[in-house]
Structure formats: C-alpha cells, structure tokens
Image (spheres, rainbow, N blue to C red):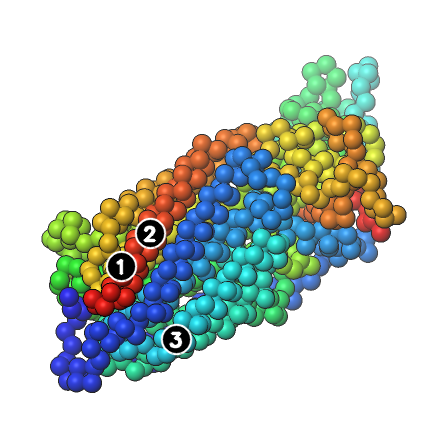
Amino acid sequence: MNHGPLIAAGAFVSLAFSWAALVMAPQVQLGSLAPASIPNTSDVHPANRPGLAAQGAEVYRSLGCYQCHTRQVRQDALLYGVRLVDRGSNASTINLELPDSGRTNLVNFNLLIALAKSRADLGITPVAVPAVLAADTNVAPVLKEFATELKLLKQFDDKAQVVRSTSKTVNELAAALPVEVLERTGPDEAERAVKLLNDAGGKAELVIYNLGPDIERGWGARRSVARDFVNDSPVLLGSLRAGPDLACLGSRAPEKFAAAWKFASTNLASEMEQRLLIHLYNPRLVAPASTCPSAKYLFATKQPDQRFAGESLQVPGSDKPVYPRHDARALVAYLLDQRLDVGLPEAPVTKPSGPAKIAAAPAKP
Amino acid sequence: MTAPQISPPAACATAPSAVAVEASCRLPVLFFAFSSATWLLFGAVLALLSSIQVYQPAFMEGCPWVTYGRLRPAAVNSLVYGFALQASFGLALWLIARLGRVELTSPLGLFIAGKFWNLAVTVGVIGILAGDATGFDLLEFPLYAALPLFASYACIGAWALITLKARTERTLYVSLWFVLASLLWFPWILSSAQGLLLGWRVPGVVQAIVAGWFGNNLLQVVLIGMALAVMFYFVPKVVGRPLHSQSLAQNGFWLLLLIGGWTGLSQLSAVPAWIPAVSGAANVLLVVPVIVLIYNLYRTADGEIAEAWKRSGVFRFVTVAAFLLLLVTLRNAVFGIGSGARYTQFTYFAGARTDIMVLGVFGLSALGALHYIVPRLTVAQDELPSDGLVDLAFWASIVGLISLAIGYSLAGLTQGAVGATADRNFLGEAVTGVAGHLKLVTFGYGAIGVGALAFLVNFALALRRCCVACCGGVR
C-alpha cells in the first residue's frame, strides 16, 4: 500500500461499481420511461404541464417548498377485490316465487354457482331440491349441478321453502349493485372470481385496494412511482414531511386536508384555487396551527396596472383585497396539477364509479 | 513529537526540515482553517435561524430571501462546502506535507485557489438565497457557482496530488490512503453528478437517485474518509504508539470504499424498490468496516485512553468523533433498511444523518485537528493561546451535537409514529407536536456556533501573538 497509483486505481474501481449500480442501472431501467396512455381516452399520464403550472414548478423550486413537503405517496400493500356490477340474465335465471309466499326471488343460478365457487365464506351451503322445483325442467339441471358438484346450499325459507343461502341470497347481495363480493384478496383469487362471474353471465370487475397510512389519510389514491415524474426537471421529490405530502394535492378531497374544509359552492376548481391562494398569503388563515411560512411577497396590495394582472383575492379578516402576482397563480396552478388519481400499469387504481370530484384547474392564459 | 510510523533513514536524506514543511503549509493551511471555521460559524447561525422558523413560522416571515426553503439549504451548503470540504482541503494538505515530509507545491497557488473556492461558495449561498437553488440535496449551488467551485477544486486537488507524488517519505501511512481516496473521490462524484443533473439532465426520478448517490458519497466516503484520516493520524500520535494493525486498517479502508458508495438511498420512495433495498443492505454491511477501523483505533489507544483524554485536546475531539461515527453507522444500519427505514422515512430522524455526519463525525475531527495544527503553524507552540477557549470549543460542540442528535431523533420518531397510522392527527402531532424537540435543535446549532466562535477567537489570538512575535523580531 505504498503506491499512490494503486490506491487511486482501487478507489476508482470501487467508485465505478457504485456508479454502475446506482447511476447507470437506474438510467438504463428508467431512462426511456414515457407517459402511459390512460385506457379509453386519448390522454396520457403524466400529461405535459400547462405553461402556468410549469412556471409554478420553478416557483416551487425557487422558494424551496420541497424542503418541507414530499411529493411521494407510499403504500404498504396492493390487494384486489371483485365488484359485481350487473347480475345479467340468462336461461337459468328463474323466478323462485312459490305459491302463497308473496316473495319474488329472481335467482341467476349460474351466478350463484360462480359466487359459491369464488366465495366459500358467503355460506352458500348445499341444497336439497324442493319438490316443486325439481319438477321444473328448466331449473333441475342447474340445481343438480349445485347440489352435487359444489356440495353447497341447503336451506329453505321455512315457510316459503325458497332456496336461500345462510347469509344472503344472491338477490339480497345484488340488491344494491354495484356490490363488492370479494374484498382484499390476492390477485389470482380475484381474477378467478371475476372470470367465474363473467362466465356466469354477470358483469364483474376487478377492484384494487391500495393500502397504507398515506393513502388512508387521503393523500393519494395510489403510491407515487417513477413514471409520475417523467415530465419533471428538476425532480423535487422532497425528503422531509414538515408539512403534508403534496403528490396529489390537486385531486385531494377537502376533508382530507391537514385542516379539513368543505366546498361551499359548485365551482370546485375555482374554490380550491382561492383556498390555496389564501394559504399562500397566510397559511394561518386556513389552518391556524400551520407552521408554513406565509408568502405575502407573492401578493400585491395595490391593484396592478397591467390589464391581465388578474382578479383580486378577498382575504378573510381583512376588508382590503390583495392581488396575487403571477408567481402566486403559477404556484397554485402547479399545486392543482399534482394528481395521483390516474392509474398506471405499475400502480393501478380502481376506476372511480362516478366522475372525478375535482378536475384539475384549467390553465390560465 | 514524531509521526507514528517508523521511516527508513535513507528517505530522510533529501527530506526538507520540519520547519520548511511547516513554512510551506502556513499560508494555505491557515487560510483554509480560518475560512472553514468562519463558514462553520456562518452556517451554524443560518441553521439556527432556519430551525426557529420550523416552529415559529412568523419568524423572519415576509421576505423570500430568508424563507425556510432557502435559508435551510443555504445553511447546509455553507456547512458542507464552506466548512467541511474546505477544512478537509486544509487537513489533506497538512497531512500530505507532514506525513510525506515534503514542502507543499505552490502554496500561493493553493491560497489563490482557496480564495476562489470561498468566492464560489459565497456566490452559491447568495444564489440559493436569491432563489436559484437547483433543488437537489447537497448540490443546491446553481451552475454559475458550481462550475467555479469545480475549477478551484481542480487546482487544489491537482496541487495536493503533485505534492503527494513528490513526497520524500515513500511509505504511505493509513491516513494518506484516506486522504488520497477522498481527494480523488470528490471530483469524480462532483463532475458525474453535475454533468448528469445540470448538464445532460437525466430524465425523471433518475435525477433524484443521482443526487442521492452524490450526497451519500460526499458524506460517507469523502468526509468520513477525511475524518478517519485525522483519527488515524492523531490517535497513535497522541498515545505515542504505532498503529495496532496495518492489515486491519487496510481491510477496513477497502471495505469502506467498496460499501460506502452504495449506502444512503434508502430514503427514496418513488423509485424502483430494488434501489432502497440494495442501499439498505449496504447500510447494514457498512457496520463491518466501521467497526474494524474503530476497533483498530481502540486497540492502538487501549489503556492510555483516560490519560490521553486529560492530556490532549485533539484526542478528546477525535475520540468523540470516532464514537459518533460508530453510533451513526449503527443508527443507519437499524433505520436504513426495511421497516425501520419506512418508519423514519421523511422525518427529521433521517434528515439528521447529514447534520451528524458533517458537524459531528467530520466536524469534531476537523476542529480537533485544527486545534492541533493552528498553534504549530502560527506561534510554533503545541497549544492555542487560551486553554479556556479550547475547553469551551470542545464542550460547546459536544453539547450542541448531543442536543442536535437528540432533538432531531425524538422529533423524527414522533413523526414516524404519526406517519405509521392514519388515525393520528398529522398537523397537531407531527408538525406542531414536535416543536419542543426542535427547540433543542435550535439550542444545538447555537452551541455549535459558540464552539466555532471560541475556536475563531483562539485562532485570532494566536495570529495576533504571531504578528507581535514577527514584528518584534523575537521569532
């Protein structure tokens, strides 16, 4: 060890290993990552930022917001479930109404079989075929399958002698469609159930459970992944949560904010924008305990002369309006552009059943 | 006192006298020592101010130049580039000259390059305060500061290597391995990271990975390497014994280089899972070389520790630094992988690693070494003029570091507990609830600033005495 060049060469090789593993390998793996197209739309995620939001990214960097806020939602587990959307109808759907029972029980037997196969815990137990049904040529083969192959279902409504499962009939189960018939299972089991139910003539879809404290907090519908940042430069992931995570601020429900609030009107995007502007002006006005520094310097107190300088902002507790400067509006546009409600192949989310509550703020010219 | 290793007499034939070696070191090393201590004071003050803002948001509010998001990176970069790296240049030059028995090549050139380095750091800090930070941890200096920084380092590093090449003492002592590795490692990682982040601009999260890789290498290899160089020089020297085992040192050195570059990325979340996993495994593996190296030091000093602690100021600093190195490595091993990493991820606990490494492991080693070097280069004495100030610098730094480490760790663990379950109130418990712990952090930065100030005053006293001596013609 008395030769300097030897030590230098050894150091170079050591560094080269770590460089190859932690610089080159990630670049090879992630370097060509591109936005993914959202199924059934012409959109991609992440979409290119509109100009104002792109300028807001620079404000975010310049003011060092990333020193206190991460933009990385974590999740602990990814589980699957099955949602039955439609019972469907096929030949073996029969009316189990018995004389004098006063009940109608439309049962899709194939669906019942499928359910029994995919969910033992529903307690659909072996059946003994009532005489009145056994006579029905339509039903008999199906019931037979039910009784022999599945060894399930054996319970009649005492009075009406209607075929019942111990917990719920299919009708009850499917009374308020869509209903989740499988919750938090592995991917194989869920996919099998979906296939069974679809083959039985029903309509079922896969449900995805992204689990973890961050997601339960409402900070995002799924974890953040590398693809979410392909349009960012610099990539400001943040490493400290002195404030809440911002990865999904744009589509966060108001009650999920650190200081919960409610929409007062139907103009959600504009209301959210106002709220964030007031937060920038003085965070203590929207969250009294907040330790976020105010950014009053992003607001003018006098009406600017420029024609496009924008509308005034009414600040609570003050009768004088303030005028957000361009940087304030840009920063808010950037924050509203943060979204994780879109599924990606590597980080799926369940399709929302209704339209998304909050659309991203429209770009301002 | 003599260097711990036995040198072959033949090598001394052309060796310059110790006085000549010291004379060549005087200008650049004292310059690096003084300006690094000044940056330490400055950085500690900025860190103190920014740590108040975390629980007193109205403090210095309303001016973008001193908002937390700018003040904090300005503080960290002042401490890393102004204090830590600059101090390591001074120490590296001094160790090379001393252990290699060689006069520094071009002391004036080194001094000028050092001036430019300081200028670049100043420009960089102003750039951050003006809002031009790049957004990458430990690489926040904008390009217009980063390029001159690299250029001035190129001169410093090249002259240091030329000096090392010209050494008359051919045996390379352990300290010089670390010095050499650090001197080469730094430009490689700096150019690699700056090229990829500010030049080529790699896409997406690769940026965050590269920045994390750079920051970790800077702390774990460059600065820890310099700290170990100081430890391996002073421990045998103070106790007056040769190093316990050369081969243990060799193993520790190579393992540190091989593993050190892989650690520290377990804090990334939105990246492929293998990256934090691999890095977490390296965090655990790093325990091996660190224990090997520190065991070697311990065996060298075993039996003399209490006596050396009383007798020597530098030994005290270096001992605490070595202890801290062991602690911070174990801490990273436990909280750098798996559920431990997940628990402390995104909290002050994880962020405190930078502070403990820069101010603790490296900072204490460097301050100790400077307490030894400065009096020799100024007044040609073994001790700085004021013993009281030496004690103050030591105890203030220790108290500061303990407060810092405890404050950040408690705050981080509280945050981790809140983050682990969605039932807890984030704002009330993880943000405002940790204010008490963060006040301890503020106190810690203040104490570290006091320590730096005590050293600076002592330094100034020594300089004054030196001037008086020179002008009076006594010396």
Label 1's element? helix
Going by the numbered disc 1, the residue's amino acid type is Arg
Residue B275: horizontal and vertical position, in percent?
50, 58
Q: CA distance from mark 2 to mark 1?
A: 12 Å
Q: Chain of mark 1?
A: B
Query: In this rendering, do the residues under marks 3 and 1 share a single chain?
Result: yes
Q: Identify the residue shown where x is 34% and y is 79%.
A: B105
For the N terminus of chain A, which image quadrant? bottom left
Within 10 angstroms of label 3, few (less than 14), some, or many (20 or more) residues? Answer: some
Residues at circles 3 and 1 in contact by the CB criterion of under 8 Å: no
Going by the numbered disc 2, the residue's amino acid type is Val
Which residue bears the numbered disc 1? B465
Q: Which residue is farthest right?
A: A307
The picture quadrant where one finds residue A310 is: top right
Q: Identify the residue shown where x is 21% and y is 57%.
A: B383
Q: CA distance from mark 2 to mark 3?
A: 25 Å
Q: Is B394 displayed left or right of B273 in the figure?
A: left
Q: Is A191 displayed left or right of B408 in the figure?
A: right
Label 2's element? helix
Residue in the foreground of this view, choosing between B58 and A114: B58
Q: Chain of mark 3?
A: B
Label 3's element? helix
Residue B454: horizontal and vertical position, in percent?
32, 49
Residues at circles 2 and 3 in contact by the CB criterion of under 8 Å: no
Q: Identify the residue shown where x is 28% and y is 78%.
A: B103
Q: Is B194 displayed left or right of A10 in the figure?
A: right
Residue A78: horizontal and vertical position, in percent?
59, 45
Which residue bears the numbered disc 2? B457
Which residue bears the numbered disc 3? B108
Within 10 angstroms of label 1, few (less than 14), some, or many (20 or more) residues? Answer: some
